Each structure stands twice: as C-alpha cells, then as structure tokens.
Image (spheres, rainbow, N blue to C red):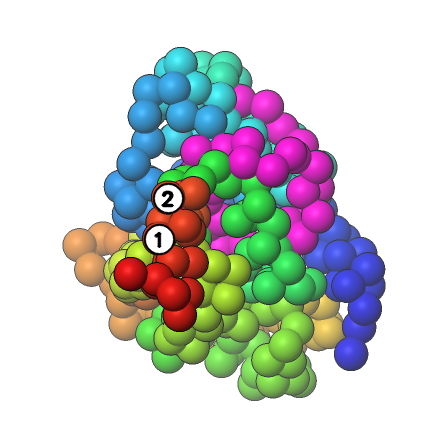
Amino acid sequence: MPSADEIRDSQRVTWAGLSAGWEKWDSVIMEQLGPVGAAMIERLDIAEDQQHLDIASGTGEPGLSIARRSPKGRVVLTDLVAEMLEVAVRRAGEQGVANIETKVCSADDLPFADATFDSVSVRFGYMFFPDMGRATAEFERVLKPGGRLCSSVWVKPEENPWTAIAMQAIATEAVVAPPDPDGPNMFRCAAPGCVRDLYEGAGLRDVAEWDVDVELVTRSPAQYWEMISEHVSLAVAALQQVDEPARERIRARAVAKVSAFEKDGKVRVPGVARCIVGTKQDASSTRASDGARSPNAG
Ligand SMILES: C[S@@+](CC[C@H](N)C(=O)[O-])C[C@H]1O[C@@H](n2cnc3c(N)ncnc32)[C@H](O)[C@@H]1O
C-alpha cells in the first residue's frame, strides 16, 4: 500500500503530464462535464458575494463558472498540480474572469483558516485523494457554519461507455490490472453511498446524492480516440505499456466500437456521474442536537 506522500507524488506526475491534453481538448471536455458542474452549482446556492473554494480545480471548473455568478465574491481555485492551475488561469483570462486566485495544495491539507468559505466544490477530484476521510474533514473545517459542500464522482464503468469502450480496446493488448479499491482511480467512488458516508462521517447534515447524465460529443470516431487517449488518466497510463503497432490495433478497435454511437453526423457516447451535497452544521443546530442527545434534555 503506497503512503500518502507516494500517492501525491504519483498524482502530481500523472496530472502534470495530462495538463496539455486537458487544454487541447478543453471545449469537448467542458461540454461533456458541463451538466455536472451546473447540477453542483444549483445546489450550492451561490450569492453575488460568495466566498468559494474549488478543490481539485484542474483547468478551472466549476470554480470559474461560480466566479462569474458571484461578481462581488471571490473564488479560490486549488489543485495539487501547478500545470493544471496554469491552464485554469489562462482560461480565466480568456473568459474575462478576474475574481479568482489560485493555490497549489493537496485536498487533505488545506492552507486556510477554519470557517473561511461559504461553499466548497470538488468536481471529479475525490477519487484521487490519498485519504478521502481526511480531505472531507478539511472541507468541513474551512466551511462556515451552514455552508455547503458539493462534489461529483463517476459511477461504475458499465454506465460510462465513453471511457469503457477505450479501456476494453486497450485491454486486448495491454494488462489492465483491476484498480486497487483503496487507491486513486477514476472509479474509486463509484459505489452508491461512498462519498455520502464520508460526508456523514465528517458531521455534515442534509446529505443527498443524485445521478446526472453526461454525453461525450466528438466530430468523428477518430476524434473520440484522439481525445480519450490524450486526457483520460486510466487510458494514458495503460497506453504507456504498448508499442506503436499495438497502439494502432487498439485505436482501430476503439474506433470501430464507438462508431455504433454515430448519430446526426457526430459521435455521442453517454455516461453517468453522481453528485453529493451536504451542509455544515451551524452553531444553533449543533446545540439543538447536543440537547437532543442529552439525557436531561426537556
Ligand atoms: C479529473 S481532474 C478534475 C478537474 C476539474 N475539477 C474538472 O472537473 O474539470 C482531477 C484533478 O484532481 C487533482 N488532484 C489529484 N490529487 C489531488 C490532491 N491530493 N489534492 C488536490 N487535487 C488533486 C488533479 O491534479 C486534477 O487536476
């Protein structure tokens, strides 16, 4: 079992290497993940002067969308990897979003005082943290009482053919080891209740989870393969094991399989994500529940 430091080190290398792919395919990725960000933002109840923390921001979402909705507020975009946040800063500049700042840090060790933020978001980050319970405790700590945490994770591969097609093609030529259920991988939090239990363990209340459909839309099967092989963490890692002829056979298989999803001149491959929301206890509800637990209450 790798240590937390080893996990962080390997995640740093992985995501620094993926940052160029995420920037190149920005518009396709953002269109695919947009419904998830929108669903999260809806539940975060963003005010025009929101103080918001976006964890594992990568290239900036949903933090940049929240900053646009909160012109008098401030959004802090954080990530383990400086190269990803550099893309986020370029995207913010292109979009004219100025009320943001960035901080390189790990989700499980946040450099912010207690009760600093009105809300916290984590879109597709949880699965990569060395200690998800410790990270959740950090999110709870930096939230103001009554503040909300909303995150999203992928449900199981069978419901995400947009990535399963590529992984099945890769598995015909490379050894794709079953992911360590306790180690970082994009489906680590797929089981229903996985993140909900973390929230409840950290003392959040009114915890709810729900699924959101996504669709990966590319111009052609060839473009589908190009973008997946350049930005999906599992695919990029597995492809490093194979030589060029094997890579070409994998590409041909994935392209043939994904052609079944061609519709109206585009390739449209579905997927499903899960969102989870919860609220930090405010002082009055903590007192009320303490009272309820007390044998002398009432
Ligand atoms: C799938 S990307 C998500 C990016 C963005 N939130 C989005 O939805 O477009 C996952 C991000 O998690 C970051 N990450 C991995 N381990 C982390 C950690 N321990 N703390 C903070 N971020 C981490 C990676 O660097 C990467 O940018």
- Residue furthest left in the image: 264
How much space separates mark 1 and mark 2, taking CA atoms?
A: 6 Å
Camera-nearest residue between 138 and 258: 138
Q: Where is residue 141 in the image (x, y as percent from the top left)?
A: 57, 45
Q: Is mark 2 on a helix, strand or loop?
A: helix
Query: Of the residues shown, which amino acid type is indicated by label 1?
Result: Ala
Q: Which quarter of the figure has residue 153?
A: bottom left
- Can residue 95 be seen at all in this image of the molecule? no
Pinpoint residue 84: horizontal percent, then vertical percent: 63, 39
Q: Is residue 225 left or right of residue 21?
A: left
Circles 1 and 2: CB atoms closer than 8 Å: yes
Residue beneath the point at 59% across and 80% down:
181
Q: How crowded is mark 1: few (under 14 residues within 10 Å), some or many (20 or more)?
A: few
| Residue 159 in the image, given as x and y percentages of width and height | 34, 74
Write down the region rendered in magenta. Answer: 100-125
Query: Which residue lies under the disc numbered 2?
Result: 284
Residue at mark 2: C-beta within 8 A of ligand 1: no
